[in-house]
Image (tube, coloured by chain):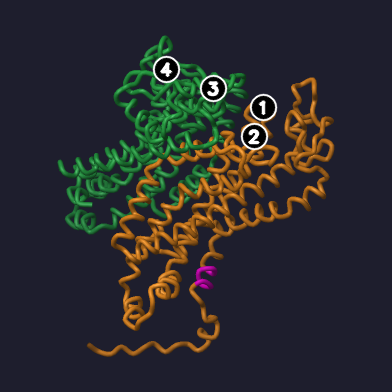
Amino acid sequence: MTTTVPPVQEPTERQDQAPASPWRSAWRRLRRRPIAMTGLGIIVFFVLAALLAPVLTGISGWGPTDIDKHAVNPYLAGLPRGSFGGVGVNGHWLGVEPGLGHDIFARLLYGAQVSLLVAFSAALLITLVGVTLGVVAGYFGGKTDMVISRFMDIMMSFPSLIFMIALLSVAKDVNRILLLIIVMSLFTWPYIARVIRGQTISLKHREYVEAARASGTGSARIVLTEILPNLTSTIIVYITLAIPTLIGSEAGLTYLGVGVQPPTPSWGQMIADSELYYKLDPMFFILPCACLFLVVLGFTLLGDALRDVLDPKGGNG
Amino acid sequence: MTTFLLRRLAGIALTLLVICAVTFTIFYLLPNDPAQAFCGKDCTPDHVAQVRQQMGLNRPLIVQFGNYVWAIFAGRTMGSGSFAVHCGFPCFGYSFQTGMPVWSMITDRLPISVSLAIGSAVLWLAMGLLAGVVSALRRNSWVDRVLMIGTIGAAAMPVYFTAMLLLYFFCSQLGLIPYPRYVNFTDDPVGWAQNMLLPWITLALATAAMYARMTRSSVLETLSEPFVRTARAKGLRERRVVNKHGLRPALTPVVTMLGMDLGGLLAGAVITEQLYGLPGVGKLFADALHKSDQPVIMGVTLVASFFIVTSNLVVDVLYAWIDPRARLS
């Protein structure tokens, strides 16, 4: 075998490139994808809207539970006055809901708060439980793995939507938002745990893990310093793609009347209310549905791009 | 194959029993008092106690659970004296609201949910497979880009949005299609299809997008396999390579997904049925929720679980039949 002469490096090229950490280079690749940036833009927009809800409603002048009888027409079954669901009437930027004349703009903002709060908290809980159990099952194997895997199998063969509905419907006097977060997490964690378990099994036989073990490092330390850092990108991708599903489930459960309860404003509730009026006041269903669509779209676009950027094996393009 | 089947059947029986126990515990341990619910709001405490006695609610939980499970297979006589009614196999008890046997309430509505599930499955398979295969074969072309962006959009569409937009434009504004109401297939097949069209599209759209994405990646993966390269190398025409060698193995994951999705849908698409007012099992479930009709909620939950678990079994058995390696795991 002949020795190959390494090509001479141009000195200028080295100076240009900052010492790129894997994360920084992933971010650079992500930034070049207009679709990913669109997704991120949508997410940032809704997060800001949710956080600034009190400020924005302060500017618009209508709170989420304010009643405005002057914006609706009592002789027309309480339909909004003016065109397009009452846009601009009485200073309602996006019109009013039929009936009590609730301000749609304010309710959408506070609905975003609930939707994102529930989805983010549930995602956090799923990550904690799923990653812990997945790593424990994968790393320790044997009986531990068998028990955890069997439990995951049973949890995954539950018809989750129906069970979520059943659980939520029997519990009456509790904090609905907290209950939603717990119930949704209960049926979602096995999916991430299974992925993490598989990855942990393949990681634990790598040389550097063997080396760490041979040099007397304890299990806890190996898991924390050798295995977990290598799982981070999987976790990030998985969670970004789990959030839209969680947002959708929350809206669905609330739509069916077992999720967030009035007077807390929520998109699912607005959609359920708008069903009665879809023929006469289409704006009422279009606005919350469009918000739901955009948020889910934003997270899916970003998650898809993240999967391609962080984990080329799992990408499909 | 026999041991595989037996092992899977035992696994299923265990899973169903666990699901049954969990469902039972949820409904009978939580604060809602079934006797009070059955009896109604203005019942005297004596009367409630009597109902509790009749329903066997004062026995230990494990006995009640045993009776409930036993009744599903063997039937059971409820009440006593002149009020006694025999509830035959499969007995899920009686609705608190209508007093009808839960099982017959479910079977009455099953054809509607099955119509919805099968019709939309045909639709989403056709759309998903076509889009996925075309996209994979024209990889990175503008057709592929448009289709893939389209599928992300379609997958993000909430069913309420699809349903209400369709209803608003096609029924309300343009008047092309009558507002959906369920017509029996045997009475009027054309009317049946016409009325189910919008619910089918609504349910199929988001799922089709998922199938298109999966088909695309699956076809691409298969086409990069060595045996496809061999087929090309021995001089087969591209069309034959794709049809004979590429598509068949690429479709196995699609079949798996179809089995599971159909299983989940047979017991009712709760939200879609609610949106279109279709009186299927999903609507029955949603209505029972609003009225806290526990026997119905429990019955539907168990029947739905049964469908899901069984369809998983069917998929596994089909797999084991096609591919002997799958029998080992």
Name the residue tied to disc 4: B79
Q: Quadrant of the N terminus of chain A?
A: bottom left
Instruction: State how far apart marks 3 and 2 are (Cα).
Output: 44 Å
Name the residue tied to disc 2: A285
Specify which label sits upstream in the sequence, 2 or 1: 1
**Residue B110, image x, y percentages:** 40, 23
Indicate the secondary structure of the residue bearing disc 2. helix
Residue B109 visible in the snapshot: no
- Pick the front one: B23 or B86: B86
Q: Residue at x 33, y 66 (%)?
A: A140
Name of the residue lying farthest toward the top: B82
Of the residues shown, which amino acid type is indicated by label 2? Phe
The residue segment tinted magenta is A23-28
Q: Determine contact: label 2, label 1, CB under 8 Å.
A: yes
Q: Numbered disc 4: what chain?
A: B
- Residue A250 falls in image quadrant: top right
Indicate the secondary structure of the residue bearing disc 1. helix
* Numbered badge on residue A277: 1
On the same chain, marks 1 and 4? The answer is: no
On the same chain, marks 3 and 2? The answer is: no
* Numbered badge on residue B48: 3
Q: Residue at x 23, y 46 (%)?
A: B240
What is the display colour for chain A?
Answer: orange
* Front: mark 4 or 2: 4
What is the display colour for chain B?
Answer: green
Q: Determine contact: label 3, label 2, CB under 8 Å.
A: no
For residue A301, side relative to residue A116 (left or right):
left
On the same chain, marks 3 and 1? The answer is: no
Of the residues shown, which amino acid type is indicated by label 1? Tyr
Is residue B25 rendered magenta in the image? no
